[in-house]
Image: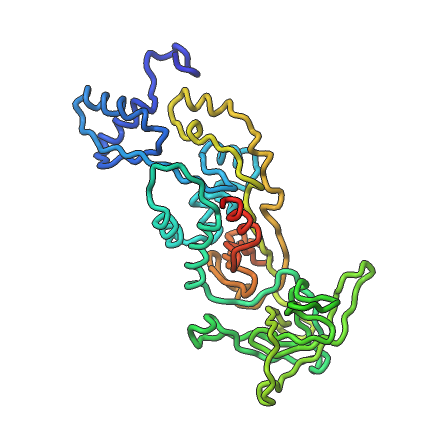
């Protein structure tokens, strides 16, 4: 009897009946399956032989396993239906819709698959290998732009209150001469993580009495800073050296991303940044042989599987920050891919439509993160 319908029908569609017939009727030349279906090959060809139908070539190979995520359809469905993620196109999922929304290009997916090739050996791939190809493709195609994720106010004391100067930032630094204007003002914003109250050896950020270079603009030197009641730095006072080139002075080694005010007493454009991490803290056990089986018996077994893998969900797989950006970022249409300098590769999310501020998803960091290196070390 059927495990769900019982004796209600004498026969019922199952994988063994439908797969081979559909392949044959659709004139499929090669039916590509993963290794768990190898045991079905005999029944596949037997039914086609009995019915005297065309027999496609059947190839089995190992499935793609990527650590710190799940790829089986039933586990993905569990994440979606129980609202652990926002939907099938959630950028944390390795679905095509999720990858597209995250800003991953088809070219990078093809490069990744081409490097891996096809094998019958079971293996597990670290996410950094996939991210490497994404990075390579986006680096070559994504225009650069300036933004800050965690703004810290900087007041430049040796500039007039109404000072607004348009400096030219590079679209593809070192590759083309194309530029776009960025306002340099008396009040501007840097990353809060780029300032320390005490300097240290090997630190290239801003500190009292220390100078840094503002990308595409001028060197600034911190003269003082102000904190709130909790001891958090809320404002930096500085002076800038606008004559460093004509005076023949070398720029500082440290270079910071920044965003200026478009006009006096007007805040820069705000944006929402969604920073995605690995979906799982570790490598969850993923019995995909049961999850991938399409016949009724295996589907029933899969439904009875435990949910311990859900305990490994990373609580920090999505961090939302609100920062400031230049006009170029604020006016970018949905789907635009950008490299926010020193921050990562981002794409304008569809949620921007109808939102008071643009929403950007971080596709991948500029460099391999510490967590990714830890994954690699563990593999070794």
Q: Is residue 366 above or below residue 95?
A: below
Task: Describe residue 187's horizontal placement relative to residue 257 as left or right.
Answer: right
| Outermost residue to the bottom | 247
Q: Residue at x 41, y 30 (%)?
A: 292
- Image quadrant assignment for residue 139: bottom left
- Image quadrant assignment for residue 160: bottom right
- Image quadrant assignment for residue 315: top right
Tell me how many marks there are. 0
| Outermost residue to the front | 380
Instruction: List x then y, in percent, for residue 76.
Output: 49, 36
Q: Residue at x 32, y 14 (%)?
A: 11
| Outermost residue to the left | 52
Q: Residue at x 64, y 69 (%)?
A: 204
Q: Residue at x 61, y 69 (%)?
A: 258
| Closest to the observer, 102 or 264 | 102
Instruction: List x then y, in percent, for residue 352.
Output: 54, 55
Instruction: List x then y, in percent, for residue 203.
Output: 65, 67
Q: Quadrant of the N terminus?
A: top left
Task: Describe residue 95's horizontal placement relative to residue 249 as left or right.
Answer: left
| Closest to the observer, 189 or 5 | 189
Q: Is residue 165 above or below residue 283?
A: below
| Closest to the observer, 214 or 361 | 214
Task: Describe residue 219's horizontal placement relative to residue 32 as left or right.
Answer: right
| Closest to the observer, 304 or 7 | 304
């Amino acid at each position: 009897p059927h495990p769900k319908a019982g004796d209600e029908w004498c026969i019922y569609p199952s994988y063994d009946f439908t797969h081979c017939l559909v392949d044959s009727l659709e004139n499929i030349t090669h039916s590509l399956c993963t290794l768990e279906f190898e045991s079905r090959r005999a029944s596949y060809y037997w039914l086609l032989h009995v019915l005297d139908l065309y027999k496609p070539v059947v190839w089995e190979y190992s499935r793609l396993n990527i650590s710190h995520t799940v790829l089986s359809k039933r586990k993905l469905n569990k994440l979606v239906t129980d609202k652990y993620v926002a939907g099938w196109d959630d950028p944390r999922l390795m679905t095509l819709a999720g990858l597209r929304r995250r800003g991953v290009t088809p070219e990078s997916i093809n490069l990744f698959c081409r490097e891996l090739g096809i094998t019958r050996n079971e293996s597990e791939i670290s996410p950094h290998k996939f991210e490497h190809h994404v990075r390579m493709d986006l680096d070559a195609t994504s225009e650069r732009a300036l933004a800050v994720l965690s703004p810290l106010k900087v007041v430049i004391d040796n500039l007039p209150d109404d000072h607004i100067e348009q400096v030219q930032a590079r679209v593809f630094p070192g590759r083309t001469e194309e530029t776009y204007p960025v306002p340099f003002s008396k009040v501007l914003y840097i990353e809060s993580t780029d300032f320390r109250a005490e300097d240290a050896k090997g630190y290239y950020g801003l500190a009292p009495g220390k100078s840094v270079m503002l990308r595409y603009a001028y060197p600034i030197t911190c003269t003082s800073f102000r904190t709130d009641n909790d001891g958090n730095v809320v404002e930096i006072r500085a002076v800038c050296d606008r004559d460093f080139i004509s005076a023949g002075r070398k720029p500082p080694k440290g270079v910071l991303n920044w965003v200026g005010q478009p006009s006096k007493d007007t805040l820069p454009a705000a944006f929402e940044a969604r920073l995605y991490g690995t979906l799982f803290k570790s490598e969850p056990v993923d019995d995909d042989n049961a999850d991938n089986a399409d016949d009724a018996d295996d589907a029933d077994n899969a439904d009875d599987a435990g949910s311990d893998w859900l305990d490994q969900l990373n609580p920090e797989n999505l961090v939302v920050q609100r920062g400031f950006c230049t006009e170029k970022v604020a006016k970018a249409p949905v789907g635009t891919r950008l490299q926010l300098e020193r921050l990562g590769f981002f794409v304008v999310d569809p949620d921007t439509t109808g939102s008071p501020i643009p929403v950007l998803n971080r596709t991948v960091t500029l460099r391999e993160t510490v967590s990714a290196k830890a994954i690699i070390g563990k593999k070794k």
